[in-house]
Image: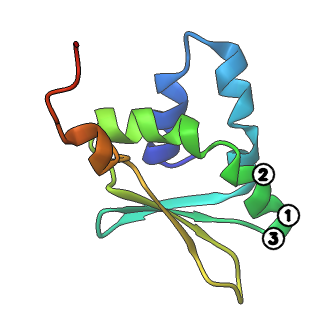
Amino acid sequence: MDRVAVAVWSFYREDPALARRLDPLLAARLSRGWGALKVECRDLAHRAMVCGVIDLLRPPLEALQLAREIRLLVPGEEPLVFPVTVPLPSSLLAYDGSIGE
């Protein structure tokens, strides 16, 4: 297991239930480069399972600043790219004075 995978699993070591949800990553190859965590999946079905754990990957990657995006790769398919930090919608950032009335 490479260092990125060890860091992710270590982040959830106190919560075995969450760590077990990361099991689809055991069948994938993880690598890091150019600000991205690359997850090489076996096929489209495996990529669909890995998509279900993206929300678990974000906290450790953001806290440890290991990557800015997550790329799910399948041979012969377009990669799926997910940002590690999900920005707030602009509607939540704009203050119009009506809050607190």
The three-letter amino acid code for the residue at tag 2 is Met
Q: Quadrant of the C terminus?
A: top left
Of residue 59 and residue 99, the one placed in the foreground of this image is 99
Residue at numbered disc 1: 45
Q: Are marks 3 and 1 in contact (CB under 8 Å)?
A: yes
Marked residue nearer the N-terminal end (2 or 3): 3
The residue labelled by disc 2 is 49
Residue at disc 2, secondary structure = helix
| Dot 2 and dot 1 residues touching (CB under 8 Å) | yes
Which percent across, then down, holds residue 68? Answer: 32, 56
Dot 1 lies on which element? helix
Q: Is residue 84 above or below residue 35?
A: above
Residue at disc 3, secondary structure = helix
What amino acid type should be assigned to the residue bearing mark 1?
Answer: Ala
Q: Tag on residue 44?
A: 3
Residue 90, percent from left and from top: 28, 49
Judge left or right: residue 19 versus residue 60.
right
